[in-house]
Image (cartoon, rainbow, N blue to C red):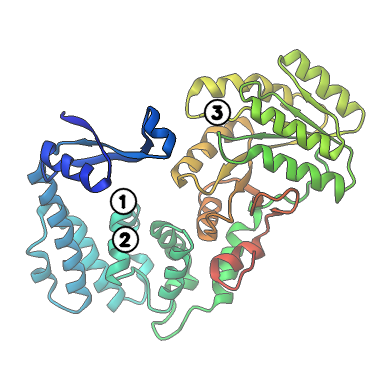
């Protein structure tokens, strides 16, 4: 594989070098601006660095893009009432099965009073993100007209089309509606509310401790500070902060600073014995203890193994608490789903989602609740301590997803 690192003063010059050395079909792997090393960098001068690779199969790549466009054009033709066989003639054989499903889908929606009876779930599940985009652009949504505006609304708020279809196919109140009848906001909200109402904690009054786990950069330490401040200032609880994060000095000092501001006890425990001793003493004294853990890449098995000893010690405590999984809405949805599947067997069944102010996609939040058996406890909406965190509830989330919500 011919991989080259290209450096030039401007992006235009860098791209010209890429074309000259690797050809017109070169694939850009990464591009960034870097400060020039040496004395010239002292004056704020930058250079463009591109990593690129020669496309060893430009013909097949071009053929793939052509066939994708052919599929989209075929869908448009069927939508506008042209003959399905004519529309399928230019579609590559590898895509013909999917095209046939799309034709059947359109014809069924036009003629049947029960669209949910068509076995299309498997087709919808296999749609890639690009194909979802193409389907949306074509205007040929696999839904009756009365539901299509809400499908578009849910998709715009971050819910995947395949998830919307699952909801639609499993709800006769949506899929059996007459073409002339619009699905009302109240009907859809009631259906969604019934599906997610058990996905929120009933009460937090009995928690004697709370442990928080999450990858690096999700805002876990700041979230702990917000919840500690709310517990002390609003619920008037005696609060103590503890961390077992001995990997990140900055995170330890950040949490220590918050403890000083709140005038609450703070401890860094370096061994399981110190952890047991400090936590046990504070619980006996009646403190509500919030426990920070190391922000690591938990897709590496060794990092999960390093936490299991502490998790088992929490499970053995006589006083009940809560274990929170913290993830950011700026992360990929697949990564959040992987984290949920990874930590649910260890008893992490409550979720905190951060950075809703940066990615206000309530439909994506709904999708997580519809897909996983996990409870959503909090959403954070900014950096201010303690204000920018809210207790999750179904009413607010549904209003955000369906419109007319307010942060």
Can residue 324 be spotted in the picture? no
Tell me: 170 left or right of 20: right
Residue drawn where x is 67% and y is 55% of the image = 392
| Residue lying farthest to the right in this orientation | 285
Quarter of the N terminus within the rendering: top left
Q: Which numbered disc covers residue 133?
A: 2
- Left/right of residue 375 with respect to residue 367 in the rendered view: right
Q: Nearer the viewer, mark 1 or mark 3?
A: 3
How far is mark 1 from mark 2, CA to CA? 13 Å
Q: Secondary structure at mark 2?
A: helix
Front: mark 1 or 2: 2
Image mark for residue 126: 1
- Give residue 334's quadrant in the image: top left
Q: Can the viewer see residue 159 in this picture?
A: yes
**Sooner in the amino-acid sequence: mark 1 or mark 3:** 1
Q: Which residue is mark 3?
A: 296
Query: Residue 346 appears at what percent x and percent y?
Result: 61, 30
Where, by quadrant of the figure, is residue 67 drawn? bottom left
């Amino acid at each position: 594989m011919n991989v080259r690192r290209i450096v030039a003063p401007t992006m235009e010059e860098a791209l010209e070098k890429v074309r000259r050395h690797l050809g017109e079909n070169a694939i850009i792997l990464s591009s960034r601006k870097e400060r020039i090393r040496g004395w010239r960098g002292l004056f704020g001068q930058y250079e463009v660095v591109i990593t690129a690779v020669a496309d060893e199969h430009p013909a097949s790549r071009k053929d793939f893009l052509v066939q994708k466009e052919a599929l989209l054009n075929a869908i448009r033709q069927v939508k506008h009432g042209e003959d399905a066989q004519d529309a399928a003639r230019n579609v590559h054989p590898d895509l013909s099965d999917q095209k046939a499903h799309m034709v059947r889908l359109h014809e069924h929606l036009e003629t049947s009073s029960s669209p949910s009876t068509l076995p299309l779930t498997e087709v919808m599940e296999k749609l890639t993100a690009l194909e979802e985009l193409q389907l949306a652009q074509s205007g040929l949504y696999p839904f009756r007209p009365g539901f299509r505006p809400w499908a578009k609304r849910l998709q715009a708020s971050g819910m995947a089309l395949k998830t919307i279809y699952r909801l639609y196919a499993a709800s006769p109140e949506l899929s059996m509606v007459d073409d002339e009848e619009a699905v009302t906001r109240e009907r859809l909200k009631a259906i969604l509310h019934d599906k997610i109402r058990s996905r929120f904690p009933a009460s937090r009054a009995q928690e004697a401790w709370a442990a928080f786990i999450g990858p690096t950069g999700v805002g876990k330490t700041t979230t702990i500070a917000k919840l500690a401040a709310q517990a002390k200032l609003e619920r008037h609880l005696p609060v103590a902060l503890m961390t077992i994060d001995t990997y990140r000095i900055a995170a330890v000092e950040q949490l220590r600073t918050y403890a000083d501001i709140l005038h609450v006890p703070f401890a860094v425990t370096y061994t399981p014995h110190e952890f047991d001793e400090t936590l046990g003493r504070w619980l006996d004294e009646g403190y509500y203890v919030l426990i920070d853990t190391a922000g690591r890449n938990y897709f590496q098995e060794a990092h999960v193994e390093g936490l299991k000893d502490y998790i088992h010690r929490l499970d053995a405590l006589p006083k009940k608490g809560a274990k929170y999984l913290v993830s950011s809405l700026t992360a990929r949805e697949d990564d959040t789903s992987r984290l949920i599947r990874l930590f649910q067997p260890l008893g992490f069944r409550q979720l905190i989602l951060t950075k809703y102010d940066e990615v206000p996609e309530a439909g994506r939040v709904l999708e997580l609740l519809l897909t996983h058996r996990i409870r959503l406890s909090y959403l954070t909406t900014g950096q201010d301590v303690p204000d920018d965190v809210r207790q999750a509830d179904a009413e607010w989330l549904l209003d955000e997803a369906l419109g007319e919500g307010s942060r």
